[in-house]
Amino acid sequence: MTDAAITRDAGPARRDPDGLVAALFLSFLATAGIFYVNIMPALVSGLISGLGFSQREAGFVGSANLYGAAFGALTIVLLIARIEWRRTCYALLATLVTVDALSMAVHAPGVMIPLRAAHGFIGGMLVGVAFAVIARTKSPDRVFGVLLFVQFGLGGLGVMALPRLAALYGTGVLFLALIAFSVVTLAMLPFLGAYPPRSPAARAAMGGASASAGKFVLALLAIFLFQASNMGLFAYILELGASAGLPREFISTAVGAATWVGIAGCLLVIAIATRHGRTLPLAIGLVVTLLGIWVLHFAGNRVVFVVANCATGITWSLVMPYLLGLASAFDRAGRAAALGGFASKMGLASGPLLGALVPTGEQFALLINLSCVGIALCALAALIPARALDKHSAA
């Protein structure tokens, strides 16, 4: 069969490799390796209640997954130019299914922690490949917007449904959910286009790798700071609300609702992409994030707590696609996007770690202030390369 016939018969994702269906399939591919992040509260709770892990042991399992993913994403940067991405994804997805199946039989923290670290490493490689492929699309920012839509939407559904299922059928349900997600992604993989590495007119978006190297580092720093500042506070948001005197039932409902409301941010990215550049949406999103975090000083007020969580939920899913798209613009072969994935995961893993080192109790004000400082530094780091890229695109 000819390539044309394959493309004609393979479905909408291959017929239009830059269309919405293709973006959805690529989003599943980029989510499969780290879907456990989106259901992390359910996973940690299931390990504690179902397998008798201590809170510390369950936390180590989550951290092992995340740090493994970060270094998996870093490793793929060295390999992406020499591998055939589709075959690699088949192998990585199959391995993820195997490791998740093995995890169902493990009940000891000493075995679970290294096993999930290995899972994280494999998943991080998969995400790195997916990010590299997304960088080769016509509008990476738009695809990253769809990615955040998938993660927020399915993550919210998972957090609501999986704890109840785990209570009925055991902790294995959590790993079955991860297996099911990988299997669905495997079924989507054949329908994606070829996405060969692009050969841009210049090696980087601003006329030469040496001229743009500093700005690319700033883009990576912005991704790290944004993720660390948000996750460092979000990981303790339940405790923060409780320390402010709010009922836990109210806190859980408010945070869950904010996750779904947050989808609005990535829908905006999908709708407008980079038609107005990246500088303006990044500036607006980061200012709102800063204000949303700062008003948590007054979290004892229910309206303030709800509005702050909804606002930061929206901006989280708005800013991240633009930051990832910003990094992708420096190298359409995909290496820069994979490094962006590494910076993102290091931020997600390091934020809660930093938060754990900050005295809490009645001192959540310090954690809020540190997050505000992180977002302010992120804005400084992000807007310099964003403005330069916008000028280059307009030239």
Image (spheres, helix red, strand yellow):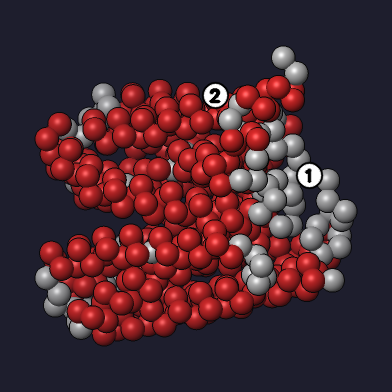
In this image, 202 relative to 174: left or right? right
* Disc sitting over residue 198 in the figure: 1
Q: Secondary structure at mark 1?
A: loop
Residue at screen point 59% across, 36% down: 13
* Disc sitting over residue 91 in the figure: 2
In this image, 319 relative to 253: left or right? right
Pick the residue in front: 91 or 393.
393
Pick the residue in front: 140 or 329.
140
Q: Amino acid at mark 1?
A: Arg
Pick the residue in front: 293 or 19.
19
Residue at screen point 69% across, 33% down: 194
Q: Is residue 60 visible?
A: no
Q: Position of residue 3 (x, y in %)?
A: 74, 23
Q: Amino acid at mark 2?
A: Ala
Asked if the residue at tag 1 contacts the one at tag 2, i.e. Cβ–Cβ closer than 8 Å, the answer is: no
In this image, 196 relative to 252: left or right? right
Residue at screen point 61% across, 45% down: 19
In this image, 198 relative to 283: left or right? right
Q: Position of residue 394 (x, y in %)?
A: 79, 71
Label located before the other in sequence (2 or 1): 2
Q: Quadrant location of the N terminus?
A: top right
The image shows residue 244, relative to residue 71, as above or below, that is: below
